[in-house]
């Protein structure tokens, strides 16, 4: 059988490296939420991971600009790289807000969302690593299904948390505004995992 997968591994190295930075950043965010108020080390590590992810993204897009033959469609490479980087950016946004806001404690619903995000990016990373080896959609199906289920779980958690905050007549409006921003941003990160899953599925279907 002729191997139709490209021999040049540089793009796959970059995809996998970026996906691993996403996982590490999500892990630091989960640790930050569960170990609050001891957050300074996690905030700095997330900041470092965001800078590193930006560098990987820049390298990947530069390589895309100067490479004539790519493993799959150029627009799909661009989309995959940008979507992975966007997740790290959302995590970095949250870490910065932890540094700026004077929070008294971490809401349990937010801790739950950091767990959902970590599981989603772990499935995402697994799918990204499969790109190097296969274009069979059935082999991506378990990771894509997991990402989809976790996106729905995160959406339900977000709705429940926001409804709880707005239904509490004794809630501090400033605290509600702060936490609404936290919940919206982490939902953006979780939704970003589904975006990556959709991009992976599109790549596989086009190149099967």
Image (cartoon, rainbow, N blue to C red):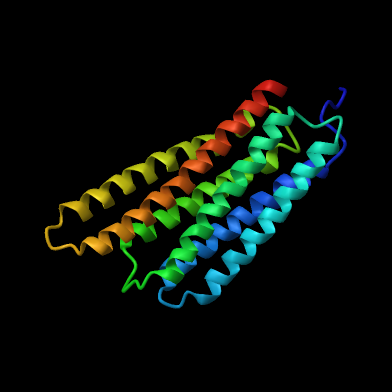
Looking at the picture, tell me which residue is in the foreground, 88 or 7. Answer: 88
Q: Which quadrant holds residue 109?
A: bottom left
Q: Looking at the rendering, in which quadrant would you find the N terminus?
A: top right
> Which residue is pictured at 64% across the width and 66% down the height?
48
Residue 208 visible in this rendered orientation of the protein: no
Q: Is residue 17 left or right of residue 36?
A: right
Question: What is the tally of numbered marks visible in this picture?
Answer: 0
The percent coordinates of residue 205 (x first, y second) are 65, 22
The percent coordinates of residue 27 (x first, y second) are 54, 61
Q: Is residue 159 above or below residue 32?
A: above
Q: Is residue 131 above or below residue 121?
A: above
Q: Is residue 136 left or right of residue 150?
A: right
Q: Is residue 78 left or right of residue 107?
A: right
Q: Which quadrant holds residue 68?
A: top right
> Which residue is pictured at 68% across the width and 21% down the height?
206
Q: Is residue 129 above or below residue 178?
A: above
Q: Is residue 22 left or right of residue 38?
A: right
The percent coordinates of residue 39 (x first, y second) are 47, 74
Looking at the picture, tell me which residue is in the foreground, 52 or 19. Answer: 52
Residue 79 visible in this rendered orientation of the protein: yes
Q: Residue placed farthest to the left in the image?
A: 169
Q: Looking at the rendering, in which quadrant would you find the C terminus?
A: top right
Q: Is residue 70 above or below residue 47?
A: above
The percent coordinates of residue 197 (x first, y second) are 56, 36
> Which residue is pictured at 53% across the width and 65% down the height?
28
> Which residue is pictured at 67% across the width and 42% down the height?
81
């Amino acid at each position: 059988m002729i191997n139709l997968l490209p021999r040049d591994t540089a793009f796959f190295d970059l995809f996998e490296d970026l996906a691993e930075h996403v996982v590490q950043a999500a892990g630091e965010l989960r640790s930050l939420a569960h170990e609050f108020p001891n957050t300074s080390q996690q905030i700095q590590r997330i900041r470092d991971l965001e800078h590193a992810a930006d560098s990987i993204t820049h390298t990947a897009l530069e390589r895309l600009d100067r490479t004539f033959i790519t493993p799959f469609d150029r627009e799909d490479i661009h989309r995959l790289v940008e979507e992975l980087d966007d997740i790290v950016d959302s995590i970095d946004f949250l870490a910065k807000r932890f540094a700026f806001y004077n929070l008294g404690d971490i809401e349990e619903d937010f801790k739950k969302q950091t767990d959902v995000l970590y599981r989603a990016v772990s499935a995402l990373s697994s799918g990204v690593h499969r790109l190097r080896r296969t274009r069979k959609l059935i082999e991506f199906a378990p990771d894509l299904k997991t990402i989809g289920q976790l996106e729905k779980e995160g959406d339900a958690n977000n709705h429940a948390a926001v409804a709880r905050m707005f239904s509490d007549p004794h809630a501090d409006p400033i605290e509600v505004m702060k936490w609404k921003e936290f919940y919206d941003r982490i939902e953006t990160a979780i939704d970003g995992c589904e975006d990556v899953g959709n991009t992976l599925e599109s790549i596989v279907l086009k190149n099967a």
